[in-house]
Amino acid sequence: MGVKPTENIQTARQNQLETADVTIPAHKTCGGEEQESHEVFILKKQEGTVCERIARSFELQHLSSGQFLRESLGGGGEAGVLAQQYLERGLLVPDHVITRVMMAELEKRREQHWLLDGFPRTLGQAKALDGICELDLVISLNIPFETLKDRLSARWVHPASGRVYNMDFNPPHTQGVDDLTGEPLVQREEDRPEAVAARLRKYKDAAKPVIELYKSRGILHSFSGTETNKIWPYVYTLLSSRIPPILPDEEH
């Protein structure tokens, strides 16, 4: 397209932005042996449509830290009980809890190609991830705070299946009910506006050193924007230079 993939889509003052980040290692180290792998890590899950497009275009398994966390909540284990206490207060789940959940899941998938959505979000989590993967590319998606808050606050879910709807751009066919079962949708406590705002502010502070870490390694690429369709061509171009796509950009 004749445009550098790291070129900003739009300009916004840094203090008005929350950051969603993607890290993409071309290799990972397992048991001391370096193996070819293509893994994508989305440090923040607000841009779900970007995650879905990456997974489809590059044939990657989409692993959501939020989904793993919800599964741990339903499992009744120690990590799930601890996580629930923080989520109910609109707080970030602490490093030692989310890291325990995520490392257990990622260890099972060392030989797979995957897209990781929602981890790492802190320096401690990033260092834990270093023990599994060697990262060589990070994409930072800079999105205005109010845009993220509005998108998250518009999310409703079908508890039994985990299907997520967004009342702004992915609403159910009938207001308040699941498309497939007709059962009622609910809004999770963590998605209520006041909880979302508190979590985003805490995330911004926690994510700064993660961004600086990847920036210091020379692997950070930044994009700014609010519309997925405008950001996506740049993301696709960058990823295509590292991972052979299975779908052409035009199909999106």
Image (tube, rainbow, N blue to C red):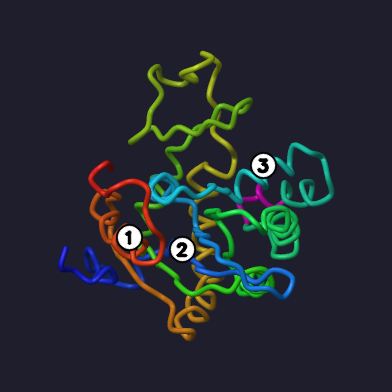
Magenta stretch, residue numbers: 86-91
Residue position for label 1: 235
Figure check: 161 above or below 181? below
Q: Secondary structure at mark 3?
A: helix
Structural distance between the alpha carbons of marks 2 and 3: 21 Å
User: Pointers 2 and 3 in contact (CB under 8 A)?
Assistant: no
User: Pointers 1 and 2 in contact (CB under 8 A)?
Assistant: yes
Q: Is residue 90 magenta?
A: yes
Residue 207 placement (x, y as % from top left): 52, 70
Q: What residue appears at the point 34 percent right and 70 percent down from the top-left corner?
A: 222
Specify whether 60 is left or right of 122: left
Q: What residue appears at the point 76 percent right and 47 percent down from the top-left corner?
A: 80
Residue 71 placement (x, y as % from top left): 70, 40
Give the mark nearest the N terminus, 2 or 3.
2
Give the mark nearest the N terminus, 1 or 2.
2
Q: Amino acid at mark 2?
A: Val
Q: Amino acid at mark 3?
A: Arg
Residue position for label 2: 22
Residue 27 placement (x, y as % from top left): 55, 70
Q: Secondary structure at mark 2?
A: strand
Residue position for label 3: 70
Q: What residue appears at the point 61 percent right and 54 percent down from the top-left corner?
A: 112
Residue 88 placement (x, y as % from top left): 67, 46
